[in-house]
Every structure is written in C-alpha cells, then in structure tokens.
Image (cartoon, helix red, strand yellow):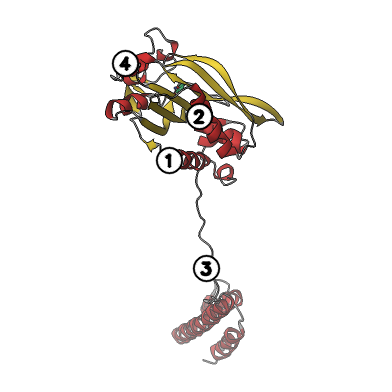
Amino acid sequence: MKSPLVDTDQILAEAVAAVGKAADFHALEMVKSTYLGKKGKLTDILRGLAEAEESERPKIGQAVNLVKEKIINAIDVRFQILKTAEVEASLKLETIDVTLPPRGQALGSLHPITKIQRILVDFFVSMGFVVVEGPEVETEFYNFTALNVPLHHPARASSDTFYFDKNTLLRTQTSPVQIRAMQKMQPPLRIICPGKVFRRDSDATHSPMFHQLEMLIVDENVNFGNLKWIISKFIDHLFKEKVEYRFRPSYFPFTEPSAEVDIKWKVGGSWRWLELGGSGVVHPNVLKAVNIDPKRYRGLAFGFGIDRLAMSYYGIEDIRLLFDSDLQFLQQF
Ligand code: DAH
C-alpha cells in the first residue's frame, strides 16, 4: 500500500533486504525488533492511525498486518538457513575420526595387601602347605579357650575384643584356624591361613581390622630351629634378602617357647623396628585340646601381620592408609 501517510511496500522491501543480510541470529533478532518490535516501524504506523482519514484506517490496518506476516515469514526462512549453516559448521569442526584408537580403559590394580598375600601364599603352597580358612565371626572357645588363653587374660577383655555376645566375637587372631584345622586333619599337617582379624585399636601401626598369615606345622621330630628356618626363608623370599629382621623371646599362652619377630621399617627418614607377629612351638595343652598326642607330635606356628609386611615392603608409614580407599595412594603400588 502506498499513500502519502504510509508506504508499506517500501517497508516490506527494506525489511526483506535486511533479513536477507542478517549474518547471524543476533543480527536477525535486531532486524525483527526494528520492524516488528514495540518501537518498530510497523507499530509506529499503527500508532499513527488516529491521524489517518477514517475511511483509510481499515485499509492501512490490513496492509500493515499483511506486511507483518510477510516479514515474519522472511525471518523464519532466514532463521532456518542460519540454523542449517550453524549445524553444518559445527559438524565440520567436530568430525569424528573413526580410525583413531579408543581412549584406554582405566585399569584397576591389586591392593598392596593382596599382592603381599599372594606372594606369601604361593611361597608356602610351593613348599607343600595347604591353604585353609576359618570364620571371621568366632566363638570364645576357638579364639581363646582352645588356645590355652586363661580366663583372666587381658586379650579377652571387651576393651580389646569386639564381642557380639559372651561367646561370640570377631576373631582377634587367625590362630583359631589352627584348632579348626587340627580337628579336621590328622598330623602330619602343614597349613597356612591368611585372613582378616579384628581388635579395638587404631593408630599408625594398628587398625581395627588387619590381616594375618597363620602358619601351622604338626609333625614328629620338628623343632624350634625348623620354625626359625621357615620364617627366615619366607622373609628372605619376600624381601629378596634386602631387609633386616630379628627374633625376640616372648610369651604367648599357646606356644612354649615363643618368639616375636621384628622387621626394619622406614619412617620419617629413619629406620625402626616394627613388630611382625608371634611364633613358637605349640603348647602341649593346645595339642591336647584337639586330641593330638603331645608326646608324639610337636607343633610349630606363627601368626604375622600381612599389613605390617606391606608397610615395611613398600615403606608405608601409617597402616590406616591401606584402608582409606584413596585411589591416589593405592595407585602407587
Ligand atoms: N596370634 C598371635 C597374635 O595375634 C600371634 C601368634 C603368636 C600366632 C604365636 C602364632 C603363634 O601362631 O605361634 O598376637
């Protein structure tokens, strides 16, 4: 429509040209508001209708609406063109090279305790030992009484041991497996038992849950010298003879004589002794408790902390680090 007041054809031509030139969504948005917005050219015309002749008004109104529709159409078309161009550009940028090798899968690794345990178990199995396991929830009988631990012994106290009730507890040592094994197997026997044990204790060298490796030989004509030889052999095997350790006389209710073994452990730059565990010749009372004749047979046993071996082996300064599930720490091994 062309009149002295309004030239909608001119506006349409201008708008369509501007839409065609809009190079991106922002420019298109600007064109849209220039022509269709509240302060846009078409809105201006509608606002000026009052000044037009009354007979002209409907015609102007219709013409404006028609132009508006055409501009909207032109914007839609332009929008689609811009959109398609955008998608094509990003497809070009983000091309996938299907010939590239895939990103590697992050592999887990064995826990240091598992590693040490496997080396030890392999060693003893190669020497003819049988691996046996026992329950972690034990009875007071297997954990203490059958092992000749007197009723007043401090290890029995609830300040040291996790009890479920008077007779049921979390085993504080793997030694009860000795009793279970001797009840089932006839001598001569050679067993090892790796497993979790539990005590109310927590500091740099103690954790409420830790691991022990129990060893038991029952045979005729075996002696403390044989026990010492076996212990030396396995430590030398694990550490490739590069660690110092010592035997120290000690006392356990279930062995006589008894010895503790300490190993060198590096903490804060200096070497210290770290107690590995106990060993000894099985007390006659323990053999009697499982109907083995102590005059004919002798038992040799030890129970060592696998975690402590790992601490010395890898130079770990706090046992609790082993159980924090901190991947950064664990990935070092
Ligand atoms: N069970 C003892 C502890 O946890 C260690 C031990 C000492 C085990 C002497 C043995 C042994 O088999 O003969 O402290």
- Residue 274 sits in quarter: top right
Which residue matches tag 2? Answer: 305
Which label sits in the foreground, 4 or 3?
4
Q: Secondary structure at mark 2?
A: strand
- Note whether residue 168 is visible: no
Check disc 3: other Cα within 10 Å, few if <14, some if 14-19, many if 20+. few
- Closer to the N terminus: mark 2 or mark 3? 3
Residue drawn at (60%, 75%), measured in percent from left and top? 30
Which residue matches tag 1? Answer: 125
- Closer to the N terminus: mark 4 or mark 3? 3
Which residue matches tag 4? Answer: 288
Q: Is mark 1 within 8 Å of ligand 1?
A: no
Residue 56: x and y in percent read 48, 87
Q: Secondary structure at mark 4?
A: helix
Which label sits in the foreground, 2 or 1?
1
Which residue matches tag 3? Answer: 102
Position of 295 compared to 243: left or right? left
The amino acid type, in three-letter code, at marker 3 is Pro
Q: CA distance from mark 2 to mark 1?
A: 19 Å
- Closer to the N terminus: mark 4 or mark 1? 1
Residue 91: x and y in percent read 54, 78
Which label sits in the foreground, 2 or 3?
2
Tag 4 near tag 3, CB within 8 Å = no
- Note whether residue 124 is visible: yes
- Residue 126 sits in quarter: top left
The amino acid type, in three-letter code, at marker 1 is Val
Residue 40: x and y in percent read 57, 76
Disc sitting over residue 78 in the figure: none
- Closer to the N terminus: mark 3 or mark 1? 3
